[in-house]
Every structure is written in structure tokens, then in C-alpha cells.
Image (cartoon, grey):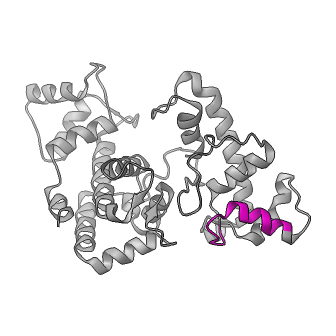
Amino acid sequence: MRAYKKTILKDGDGDDWVEKREFHALLLNIFWFNKIWGVFEQMTGCAQNADRRMDVDEFYAGMAQLGLHLTSKQEAQAEFAKIDTNSGGQVLFVEFCAYIRKRVNPDDNPNFDADIVSGEHCGKVLRKHGGHKATNSHFVCKKCFKDFDELEKVIKAIVRDKKKLKELWNRLDFNGNNIVSLAEIDKLAVEAYPLLNHKPALMRAYKKTIKEGNGDDWVQKKEFKSLLANLFYFNKIFWVFDQVDNDHDRRLDFHEFKQCLSLCGTPMHEAQARQEFQKVDRNGGGIILFDEFCLYFASKECPEAFRDLLTD
């Protein structure tokens, strides 16, 4: 995630796609951030404790692995304080990346790490997954509509209950600064709601929430209800999308689109379905992407129950 974000936002033109001319930067970023992640993982022992945060003792003990020797514990504490700007005693992977870059190649350009402010403001965490498939983390177990129906009841109950909503927010916003990052949202989904652990859907929910908010990169406390609704809704849409995406290319052709409509309880005649497909497939390429399907489906099947809750 860190390599991808740096490629599109810092090395590229700022859109969501890695283009051919950006491929060289992508390869370098993938290598660089994975190497740093390997060191970070060893230093923090996060394969065992899974907190994905580094304290000063881990920092001091592990810096030699990068060839950056600190002469004393006092020097380590001084260096650690440069990263831990909120004095919380822990730093995240993305902050560690910024620090190491400045030590190894100190081209102090503030725009390079513009998304890195402090542990309370960020955390694009690259997760380690087993297996050989890049998508092996998308599905932990077989899912069905019943699972989503049951979770929908749970989330609606939380949204209605101020105490439960506050408890869940405090779990997400562990340092109490009333803003959370994409990585913190991802961590909550993985640990608390594995049914909602579809990465493309999580990204879509995150983007929609911040777009409807004040437009910055952080989800604020007042946007939490919207975030929960978006997380549930886009994950359910993605599950439907994936069920009919037979070749798993993250694109739907017309036949798969018709299957989606049927699966969602909105079957159409051939001619009508063809018209609807063409509305989504604006460039006439014969395929539609997940984001395009989300926009279409949201306009047709808006979750009124969630909307009523969010306006309370």
C-alpha cells in the first residue's frame, strides 16, 4: 500500500492508476518499502504481537540491521523523539519509513512525505500475507447473504446506541485525537469485522467518507457513522461483484453484469439490462470496473435504512 500510494501521489500524476511511465518508480518503491517492512517486522516482533508499532527499545536494538548504528541509549531516545512527535511512546511503519529515508538519503523535501505527520495522523501499513496469490487476504471464509444480513443488524444497533458507538470509536481511535487513518480503519476491519475485509471496498468506503466530510485524509469522529455505513455497504457490493466476476479480473462484462442484477434481486429483460450496462460503460469498452459498478448500484439501490440512521 505504501509503495502504491507513493507511486501515484508523489511520483505520478495523482490519479488512482499506475501508468506505464510510472512503472519504474513502482518497482523501486515496492522493493524499498518491502525491505524496510522486513526490518520493521523483525525489530517490533509484530508477527507475534501484531500491534505494528515500535517502541524506543525496539528502535535502539534494531537500527544496526539497517547499518545505522546509535552509540548510546540516550542518542536512540533523541532520535526516536524525532519520529514520535506526539510523545506517545510508539511509532507506526509509515513514520519509520520517513525517518529511514531521511537517514539514508537526506533530501529533505517536505512534499516527499506530505502524508506523514505523526502516529495520530497516519499509518498506511503494509501487511504481510501468506500464500502466493495477491488476493489471498480478501476472503477468510466462504460468505453468504445471511452473513451480511446478520452483520447489518449488528452495525445498525451500534449506530443507534451512543454508548456502543463511542466504545467502537475509542477502539478505533486508540490515542483519542478524534481522527483516524486508513490503516487504523483497515486494522479495525481485520480484527473486529473480518466480513468487511475486502480491500477494494474498504478503499471505496474510506474515499467516500472523507469526500463527504471536510475533504482531508482523516476520518473524524463526526464522520464515524458514515464510515460504518460505507464500510458495510461497499463490502456487500464488492462481495456481490466478486461472486459473478468469474475470471476474477475485477471487471464485469455484460453477462456478469446481468448475473449481478439477478443476485441483487433486480433482474431485468435483456434490452433493459443492455441499456443499463451502457450507462455504466461510458467508453463502450464492453467492461465495467468495481468503482463504476459501485456508483451505478448506489444510485439504484441506495441504503435508505442507513440514510435514516445517519440523519438522526
Q: Give the left or right position of residue 192, taking residue 163 as reference.
A: right
Q: Residue at x 14, y 42 (%)?
A: 300
Q: Which residue is drawn at 50% across and 72% down?
A: 174
Q: Residue at x 19, y 27 (%)?
A: 279
Percent x, y of residue 86: 61, 67
Q: Closest to the observer: 218 or 195?
A: 218
Percent x, y of residue 22: 58, 26
Q: Give the left or right position of residue 85, taking residue 253 as reference.
A: right
Q: Closest to the observer: 72 or 2?
A: 72
Q: Closest to the observer: 245 or 308?
A: 308
Percent x, y of residue 222: 32, 64
Decide if residue 250 is in sight here: yes
Q: Give the left or right position of residue 228, taking residue 96 as reference.
A: left
Residue 224 drawn in magenta: no
Badge count: 0
Q: Which residue is farthest top?
A: 284
Q: Which residue is farthest bottom?
A: 163
Q: Closest to the observer: 25 or 116?
A: 116
Decide if residue 37 is in sight here: no
Q: Which quadrant of the figure has residue 15?
A: top left
Q: Which quadrant of the figure has residue 250?
A: top left
The quarter of the rendered structure image containing the C terminus is bottom left
The image shows residue 298, relative to residue 192, as above or below, that is above
Residue 85 drawn in magenta: yes
The image shows residue 109, relative to residue 232, as above or below, that is above
Q: Which residue is drawn at 85% across and 66% down?
A: 75
Percent x, y of residue 9: 53, 37
Q: Give the range drawn in magenta.
A: 75-90
